[in-house]
Image (spheres, rainbow, N blue to C red):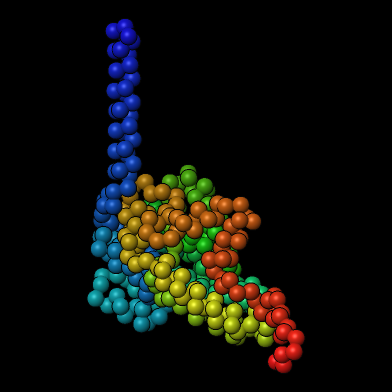
Amino acid sequence: MAPTTATAAAAAAAAAAAAAAVYIAYKWTKNWRYVSVGNGRCILLTGCDTGFGRHVAQQALDAGFKVVAACYTEAGAATFASTTATIVVADLTTAEGVERVVKAALAAAGDAGLFALVNNAGLCLPGNVDWLPPDAYERSMALNFHAPVKLTYALLPALKSTRGRVVNVTSVDGVVALPSTAAYSASKHALEAFSDVLRAEMLPWDVNVVVVEPGTMRTPLAEAFADGWLRSFREAPAERTAAYGDEWARRHVTQTNKGMEAAMVDAMPTALELVHRALLHPSPPSRILPAKGNAKILWTLGQLPDSIRDRVLYSLVFPSLLPLTLRPPPPPPPAGVVS
């Protein structure tokens, strides 16, 4: 090899190595957990009574944010008694509740302005489409979708003035809808679509919109899932559930409890990830699919062709036992045998 060729090759190799080092450094540092501190900036967080929202509130306080925590119950609010959080108790499915929370957030923010709105409040009403009543969809949309929309509408002028952030906690169910979660998944898909539009429209104002898509976390919402499904089955009109049978329902509950127990992870790591990546990071990602838990697995299943995905998800959720009316009849007794 001629010297000039060797020199050029060495230079190219050095350049490639330098580029690789820069890229690796970028990938490493962009995910540093502690990028900055809250510096007293004000955030409004909903759904703080228990579980994931309670963890996020505490982590945000620890990071130095001024937190306005919206709770649904007085009992939930009481857990913040020893903290510096501003507490407001409100039902976000009512106009009065939304107005109370908005006023509390703007008052707490003061002249410095509101830095972030974190829409986390939600409920899950499980049940199969065959028997889940339309009211369950209305209730789910009221809290999981309409409440975030109303809060965003009310607070967007304040967030534009501070170049703030809107963080919407959806779910991996907002990406791939699991059987028996129609009402919940529909509301989370709606919030995903709303977030996508909002993110694009807020580009000129430099307002960041972040969607957080957790998997199955150990929270009261997840722990109550199987019981909620069984309650919907038992409360449904008999003509809606008779085709399935009680044995099928019992097996489904057993399978669900086992699956949930295996899938549930501590909510704290995801709460930390939200605070550090969605609130503290100077350039937050548009989506956070948490590192802990089954979110990435379920997301991957959602990319399969529909015919394959449907069968995989059905087998994960429902028992191998067919619903009652779909089972083949038992074989007749042998000839000469009296049953």
- Residue at image coords 57%, 61%: 312
Q: Quadrant of residue 278?
A: bottom left
Towards the viewer: 128 or 102: 128
- Picture coordinates of residue 102 (x, y %)? 43, 67
Tell me if residue 275 comes above or below residue 13 in the rendering.
Answer: below
Tell me if residue 139 comes above or below residue 274 in the rendering.
Answer: below
Q: In this view of the protein, can residue 105 be seen by the observer?
A: no
- Picture coordinates of residue 69 (x, y %)? 36, 70
Q: Quadrant of residue 236?
A: bottom right
Q: Which residue appears farthest toward the bottom when viewing the image?
A: 338
Q: Which residue appears farthest toward the front when viewing the image?
A: 336
- Residue at image coords 55%, 81%: 250
How many numbered dots are placed on residues in this image? 0
Tell me if residue 271 comes above or below residue 202 in the rendering.
Answer: below
Q: Is residue 148 left or right of residue 311?
A: left
Q: In this view of the protein, can residue 124 be seen by the observer?
A: yes
Towards the viewer: 50 or 240: 240
Q: Quadrant of the C terminus?
A: bottom right
- Picture coordinates of residue 120 (x, y %)? 43, 66
- Residue at image coords 42%, 54%: 288
Q: Quadrant of the N terminus?
A: top left
Q: Is residue 118 left or right of residue 255?
A: left
Q: Quadrant of residue 222?
A: bottom left
Towards the viewer: 255 or 69: 255
Q: Is residue 212 left or right of residue 78?
A: right
- Picture coordinates of residue 324 (x, y %)? 66, 79
Tell me if residue 258 comes above or below residue 269 in the rendering.
Answer: below
- Residue at image coords 26%, 59%: 63
Towards the viewer: 77 or 50: 50
Q: Which residue appears farthest toward the right when viewing the image?
A: 335
